[in-house]
Image (spheres, rainbow, N blue to C red):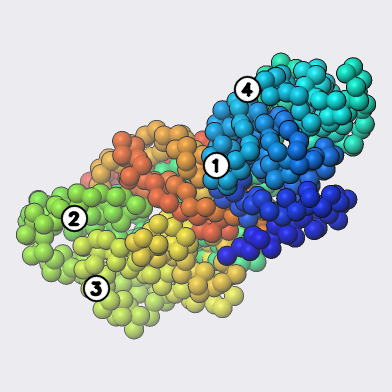
Amino acid sequence: MLDLDHARHRMVDVHIARRGVSDERVLEAMRTVPRENFVETGFEEFAYEDAPLPIAEGQTISQPFIVARMIEAAELEPADRVLEVGTGSGYAAAVMSLLVDKVFTIERHDKLAETARRRMKAGGYTNVEIRTGDGTKGWPEAAPFDAILVAAGGPRIPEALKQQLDIGGRLIIPVGERPRSQRLMRITRTSGGKFDQEDLGGVMFVPLVGEQGWADEAGATAARVLRGRSLPGMIAAAAEELPHFEDPAFGAMFDRFGDRRVVLLGEASHGSAEFYRARAAITRHLIENFDFTIVAVEADWPDAARIDREVRLRPASRAGKPPFRRFPTWMWRNTDVQAFLHWLRDRNEAVNDSRARAGFYGLDIYNMSDSIASVLAYLERVDPQSAEVARQRYGCLTPWQNEPTTYGRAVLSQNYRKCEEDVVAQCRDLLRKQLEYSTSDGEEFLDAAQSAQLIASAEKYYRIMYYGGAESWNLRDRHMFGTLEHILAANGSASKAVVWAHNSHIGDARHTEMGQVRDERNIGQVCRERFGDEVALIGFGTHRGTVACATDWGGPMEVKQVLPSLSESCERLFHDAGKPRFLLDMPDGASWREPLGKPRLQRFIGVIYRPETELTSHYADASLPRQFDAYVWFDETTAVTPLPMVREAARVPDTYPFGL
Ligand code: SAH
């Protein structure tokens, strides 16, 4: 819990009294009004920093010191009637209400006026009256005033305000030729037609927009500048723009993670080219400059193993099928992956010490797509209805496919359970064959004992996978982590790995709905638990574009439009930051981490994308800066370009990714 009372007293002592405000009544009023009730949700803990904070309509709540300074300069007396122009949050009006008889305050944005009115009521500030309108014209019916305070800066002093001062009345107003830079002026009406004028120093206020202030457009421009104070503005300020993928400077932006043992790179969909290209550029850099020798991806282990043989220039084996021929083929059979694998092979060729060559590994030892494909083929034969159920359930193994009908359908199908044993036996056989094949291959990544153990626990794995749900998700991620540990161990105690997997596997599940509501864990979380600071979790995101995906598990690849991100999502904040591509490092202590960390909708597109039901099928709550250490943003993304498959019956061999 934040001790806000303590913070409030500290603010008054340190930021206000010590800087020269000495009117004890003003200080006391500021110790009394809870400023946290006047800031936007999520900003409470910043309420007592001596800074202006963003409020709705692109406006700001003034810096506490300035509020105190202006009120002190107005020399308020208990019997005074005061006019404020620019209610904003209502904070300054609430402070003044404790010092005078009556406060009239005008705000040009109706929404702000309404919120302020609610706050006054809730806080029991009964002597404050709020009106929506142009304050440069004053409030003639309530004039004359003993004091007028203007909380926005205009090019000149509005005549109406001068005229509405009582004799002896004080007008405190920022005035300046430029929208964001003013002098704070005190005008005192000494007699009917005489005014004294004093300059109290330089200040920076939002523009005073109105008949006797700035014209709308000028004000709007200046207000846009002030968005620097809003959350998208803070993101924009902290964002580091990314160069072209092929520019070595791209990878160099990730030098800061070079000393980590494991760097996990996410993706917000399985079918957007920019995510693959960015991960390739980062990975190339880490391999070349920081001794990373493992690239472990969210792919089937046997398929990756075939590729690994080629990229590490080990004797190619003619046995086994060409890699990545199963749904979803575009994930690992596309032009960007191909380009990366070519690079990896060329680079390894130039490295004489075979141990220093970087390998390519699949984290799914249990060979998910092959297993699923053979299960589906089997069920299709013996019980098509069960096959349909299974297909739906496999959809759930990909990120956040909320398919409420899945469970109902299972009840319909009595045969589903009956098929379980056969299905599991099939998967087990498949695995056994693979392991035999891999040990005959001479790469002693798994010894005989490990293989036997793997086969024994596969039973449970396949059984649970067959039924779907949180437990199967956990098992898969635990298993992927187990594979990663194996690979690291097999490569020696100094080995370092880059992991490519979906954001849903990488973003620490404890800070997402999947962890908090569904008890799901993931590889990112387990890596943090196991390796602590030696791990970097890097998420990727996009606002809109096109994506390669399918509508159902096993269906054909389509290119769909990614809908613009929802207005209340994290993605929208990044979009509003207004920069096309950037890295946002999110170190502890960054001032925007807390407000950004409020749980917000985040989008997850896997191999399946259903824009028709996007909110329920693809969005879940998550706290971005807690999930990830850094975030890579591409405002617009494009679908990957899949590479064609040579039909199995064709005479020409399928040589992906390396042509003859
Ligand atoms: N006293 C406020 C400061 C708000 S910032 C607080 O403590 O929170 C200034 C406010 O002046 C903004 O909300 C802006 O919308 C408002 N404003 C600007 N021009 C105005 C005008 N002509 N009439 C009334 N309000 C105006």
Q: Amino acid at mark 1?
A: Lys
Q: Earlier in the sequence, mark 1 or mark 4?
A: 1
In the rendering, which numbered label is found on residue 313? none
Q: Position of residue 399 (x, y in %)?
A: 36, 53
| Disc 1 from disc 4: Cα separation | 20 Å
| Disc 1 from disc 2: Cα separation | 49 Å
Label 4 sits on residue = 133
Q: Position of residue 36 (x, y in %)?
A: 62, 51
Q: Earlier in the sequence, mark 3 or mark 2?
A: 2
Residue drawn at x 38%, y 59% is 514
Q: Are marks 3 and 2 in contact (CB under 8 Å)?
A: no
Q: Earlier in the sequence, mark 4 or mark 3?
A: 4
Task: Tell us which disc is closer to us: 4 or 2.
Answer: 4
Q: Amino acid at mark 2?
A: Tyr
| Disc 3 from disc 2: Cα separation | 20 Å
Residue drawn at x 50%, y 74% is 530
Label 2 sits on residue = 407
Q: Secondary structure at mark 3?
A: helix
Using the image as rendered, state which of residue 304 and residue 649 is in the foreground: 304
Using the image as rendered, state which of residue 142 and residue 176 is in the foreground: 142
Q: Secondary structure at mark 1?
A: helix
| In this rendering, position of residue 203 left or right of residue 588 | right
Label 3 sits on residue = 460
Task: Tell us which disc is closer to us: 3 or 1.
Answer: 1
Label 1 sits on residue = 121
Task: Tell us which disc is closer to us: 4 or 3.
Answer: 4
